[in-house]
Image (cartoon, helix red, strand yellow):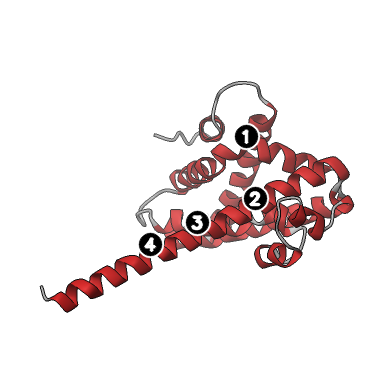
């Protein structure tokens, strides 16, 4: 390997490290702003805190807030895009021979793992949304979009459109029940376990046991 090659490799390595630092710094600001928003919404209500106040509470500017969130509502719903991507990638990772019930089990596991370390902030989020009719409607829209994403993804496993739609709606029901139990419960059970257990019980009731 020539000296020039070594220099190029070092430069590329330096750029990669710099890029990852920027990404981590960016994600850190986003999480900081989101936590600050939840804190102020919890104290004042959603309409009682401005983007400027949220940003200034953590030493940032209003411009920085809008760099990460197009509006205040999205500070509450920004995980929806990540969940959409997670649903798609989970289904794409499965064999085309995977059954519908096995597929939705994998989706619930992926979603549970994604949310597992967000219990405290998820509790705050749930209370904030319950305090606003507008936010509740937004939540329904986001859930409907997730169901649509799952339904379309399941069709790629050679399931019929009607079966895919049923399984997607069924998955949402399981998630809602498990998510509420996870937020309200005092047990140490994690979200993933709760979701899978509820799916297994439901599958037995439907005479379709999951291995």
Quick check: can you spot residue 36? yes
Position of 142 relative to 7 (above/below): above
Residue shown at 52% from the left, 59% from the top: 85
Question: Which residue is identified by label 2?
Answer: 32
How far apart marks 2 and 3 lie (CA) works out to 12 Å
Look at the numbered disc 2 and give the secondary structure of its residue.
helix
Residue 17 appears at what percent x and percent y? 38, 62
Residue 18 appears at what percent x and percent y? 42, 64
Residue neighbourhood size for the residue with mark 1, other residues' Cα within 10 Å, grouped as few (<14), some (14–19), many (≥20):
many
Location of the C terminus by quadrant is top left
Look at the numbered disc 1 and give the secondary structure of its residue.
helix
In the rendered structure, are the residues bearing label 4 and label 2 in contact, judged by CB atoms less than 8 Å apart?
no
Position of 164 relative to 67 (above/below): above
Foreground: 145 or 38?
A: 38
Question: Which residue is identified by label 4?
Answer: 17
Residue shown at 24% from the left, 75% from the top: 8
Q: Quadrant of residue 2?
A: bottom left
Q: Earlier in the sequence, mark 1 or mark 3?
A: 3
Q: Earlier in the sequence, mark 3 or mark 4?
A: 4
Look at the numbered disc 3 and give the secondary structure of its residue.
helix
Foreground: 14 or 87?
A: 14
Question: Which residue is identified by label 3?
Answer: 24
How far apart marks 2 and 1 lie (CA) works out to 27 Å
Residue shown at 73% from the left, 62% from the top: 61
How far apart marks 3 and 4 lie (CA) works out to 11 Å
Quick check: can you spot residue 158? no
Residue 125 appears at what percent x and percent y? 73, 43
In the rendered structure, are the residues bearing label 1 and label 4 in contact, judged by CB atoms less than 8 Å apart?
no
How far apart marks 4 and 2 lie (CA) works out to 22 Å
Question: Which residue is identified by label 1?
Answer: 178
């Amino acid at each position: 390997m020539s000296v020039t090659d070594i220099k190029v490799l070092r430069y590329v390595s330096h750029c990669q490290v710099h890029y990852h630092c920027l990404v981590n710094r960016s994600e850190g600001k986003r999480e900081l702003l989101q936590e600050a928003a939840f804190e102020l919404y919890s104290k004042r209500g959603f309409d009682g805190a401005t983007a400027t106040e949220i940003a200034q509470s953590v030493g940032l500017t209003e411009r920085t807030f809008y760099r990460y969130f197009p509006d205040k509502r999205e500070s509450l719903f920004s995980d929806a895009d990540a969940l959409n991507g997670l649903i798609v990638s989970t289904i794409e990772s499965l064999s085309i021979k995977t059954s519908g019930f096995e597929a939705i089990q994998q989706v619930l596991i992926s979603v549970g793992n994604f949310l597992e370390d967000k219990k405290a902030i998820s509790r705050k989020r749930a209370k904030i949304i319950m305090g606003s009719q507008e936010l509740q409607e937004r939540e329904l829209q986001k859930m409907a979009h997730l169901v649509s994403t799952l339904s379309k993804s399941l069709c790629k496993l050679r399931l019929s459109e009607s079966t895919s739609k049923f399984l997607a709606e069924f998955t949402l029901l399981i998630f809602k029940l498990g998510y509420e139990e996870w937020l309200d419960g005092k047990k140490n059970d994690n979200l993933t376990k709760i979701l899978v257990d509820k799916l297994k019980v439901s599958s037995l009731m439907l005479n379709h046991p999951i291995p």
